[in-house]
Amino acid sequence: MSQPFSGRRAAAALVTAALLVPLSACGGNDDSKKDAGSEKSGSAAPKADLTVLAASSLTDVFKKAGAVYEKEHPGTKVNFSFAGSQELAAQVKEGAPADAVVTADTKTMDGMKVDVGTPTVIAKNRLVIATGEGNPKKIGNLKALADSKLKVVLAASEVPVGRYGQQVLDAQKLKVKPVSQEPNVRAVLSKVELGEADAGLVYKTDAATAPKKVDAVDIPDAQNAVASYPAATLKASQHQAAAAAFVKWLSTPEAQKILEQAGFQKP
């Protein structure tokens, strides 16, 4: 006995619906894969746990910048490893698992050119003479550092701030015998903070992090050195797109404002 017309039409509709379900499901999977791929390789910052190697003088400001970046990019975590630029370069050459690097000089960055992408200078800095709070030794200029009665601490010559410091002293034909040569600028600052040194050459921004413990004696621009901070992604990074997005963000007005508030100069 044949089915009524309405019955046959209902049966056909059920068959058609059954056939469309798997086709729809397949189409949905393709779209989701496409979206996932877009997120992974698109211009918007992908989600990732990033490790950024950064110069010691960026410690405070990068912690603030990193918090802002994470808030704006949910799902992204920025982990910083701070050290002297020469130490960062050694880590990169040894294959340390990281995604980007920011040094306190272009020379160190240039020495890593086979390991990094194209660098971008994100900020500049200048030197000051850090003294004990209240400047008890009444140090007023670079010439005063040549006084053998003073305990002066400098960074080692292979450290950017140490190289800049020696550069300004040599330009003024001053011979300074440091009581110690430290591995990074924060170690120099610490010696002055603890009273283990009367003075030290540090970046302006580092002295600004300890206003209640040290005084900063300005060095005239004509006698000073300008430190440049280049940032670059690492070619060995497992998160190339995310690393590139962070490095690019460091040059945005928002990031530049954070750097400027910390005392850094525009690139």
Image (cartoon, rainbow, N blue to C red):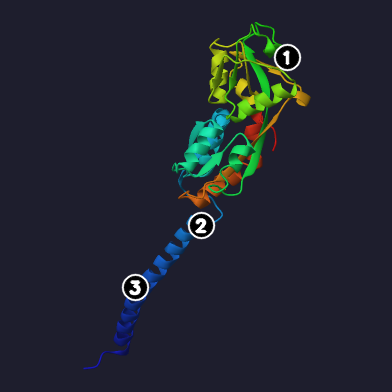
Is there a contact, CB below 8 Å, between mark 3 and mark 2? no
Whether residue 62 is visible to the viewer of this picture, yes or no, is yes
x, y percent for residue 235: 51, 50
Q: Which structural element holds mark 2?
A: helix
Precedes in sequence: disc 2 or disc 1: 2
x, y percent for residue 59: 54, 29
Q: Amino acid at mark 3?
A: Pro
Q: Residue at coordinates 45% horizontally, 41% vertically from top-left?
A: 94
Q: Which structural element holds mark 1?
A: helix
Q: Which structural element holds mark 3?
A: helix
Query: Measured along the vertical axis of the image, is residue 169 above or below residue 98?
Result: above
Q: Amino acid at mark 1?
A: Lys
Query: Measured along the vertical axis of the image, is residue 35 above or below residue 74?
Result: below
Rendered image: mark on residue 22: 3
- State which quadrant residue 121 falls in: top right
2 vs 1, front mark: 1
**Which residue is the extreme one toward the right?**
222
x, y percent for residue 1: 21, 94
- State which quadrant residue 102 falls in: top right
Label 1 CA crowd tier, 10 Å (few <14, some 14–19, many 20+): some
Depth check, front residue: 7 or 34 = 34
Q: Determine which residue is flagged by label 1.
A: 143
